[in-house]
Amino acid sequence: MRKIIHIDMDCFYAAIEERENPSLRGRPLAVAGSSRRGVLTTANYEARKYGCRSAMPVFKALELCPALTLVPVRFDLYRSESARIRAIFGRFTEVIEPLSLDEAYLDVSHLRSAGAAVAREIRAQIREETGLTASAGISSNKLISKIASDWNKPDGQFEVKPEAIPSFVAALPVGRLWGVGGKMRARLAALGVETCADLQKLDRIELARRFGKWGVELWHLCRGIDESPVTPDRTRKSLSSETTFSENVRVLPGLIGPMRAMIEGLAEDLAAKHADRVIRSLVVKLKFADFARTTAERAWHTLDVAVFGELLEEAWRRGDNRSVRLLGVGVRFEDPRANEQLEFFG
């Protein structure tokens, strides 16, 4: 039986800033860009009480919490602390899959100690050596471990034993599953599905008919089934979002609203989990009614709605007035490993 631990640092960037400057403790604090047009990279728990969250525009956060203290990002410091924490992980296992600077999966199946005991020791060493706290989820697969790591935050852990997975996952809102965002929650709610138990009532064929391959994946996830291995040295090369329209879009202006919404979602994902990565370029993808597709790309280091708009127009012109069935927006990251071919949108 596998023993998978998901370690998630508590408000990592903000916690480091509080450690470096103890006078910040107990005050609403956010790590953010240098201007009011930027977004929050993270917010501490005091700030979250006011509704401040990652990827929120700075001006909005200040409206919610006028007393919010803003500090600039210091990625060199955060990377250094992340490396120290990664070294602690390495004392227990070589099978480590980093998700970002502040979270990772660890496969400790080879250890004789119970997974919960290993997680406690890892968290204790992190606290002792860095002064920072971490939370952990422990289970037999990655899906459940990641959900469980959020259960007793901050500075806690939660274990879901294999025999408890069915009851644990059945009670979960479907939004806790990988890939189920706001739009998918709305589509499921229209079917009367709010929890994983509700979703389990739909058979695999019905889910596949409604959602394609993703429906088959949902059938597994809502039952807590996840066979994906912990993959060491995982380096994400790109981040993207796609939407397939229920009806083909026949005019360019009809793509602008969906594109802006997707860029907002992309910004949230970047700020929450990939704020340390350097953007190399922006990409727009279109798939036309005849299933032909094209991508337009430009070297650019920040998310810029105007640049995305220009790329959209460029891709649209290639369609020769064909209607569009799919729109994608994304970024490529600078890859720390040279001469490696980057892939985008699979």
Image (cartoon, rainbow, N blue to C red):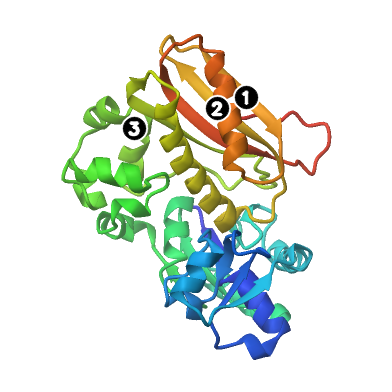
What x and y, as percent, mark residue 87?
75, 65
Q: Residue shown at 44%/43% (left/top)?
A: 261
* Alpha carbon distance from label 1 to label 2: 7 Å
Dot 3: within a 10 Å radius of its alpha carbon, few (fewer than 14), some, or many (20 or more) residues? some
Name the disc covering residue 321, or none.
Answer: none
Q: Residue shown at 45%/55% (left/top)?
A: 140
Q: Is residue 184 above or below residue 206?
A: below
Find disc 2 in the rendering and name its residue: 312
Which mark sits nearer the N-terminus, 3 or 1?
3
* Alpha carbon distance from label 3 to label 1: 31 Å
Is label 3 in a helix, a strand or a loop? Answer: helix
Q: Is residue 60 left or right of residue 92?
A: left
Find disc 1 in the rendering and name its residue: 296
Which mark sits nearer the N-terminus, 1 or 2?
1
Which mark sits nearer the N-terminus, 2 or 3?
3
Q: Amino acid at mark 1?
A: Ala
What x and y, as percent, mark residue 282?
64, 36
Name the disc covering residue 216, or none.
Answer: 3
Is label 1 in a helix, a strand or a loop? Answer: strand
Answer with the quarter of the image where residue 88 lies: bottom right
What x and y, as percent, mark residue 344?
62, 30
For the C terminus, the image quarter is top right
Q: Amino acid at mark 3?
A: Val
Examine the rendering and report whether any part of residue 227 can be seen: no
* Alpha carbon distance from label 2 to label 3: 32 Å
- Which of 209 and 13 lies nearest the eye of the viewer? 13
Q: Residue shown at 66%/63% (left/top)?
A: 33
> Residue furthest toward the bottom?
23
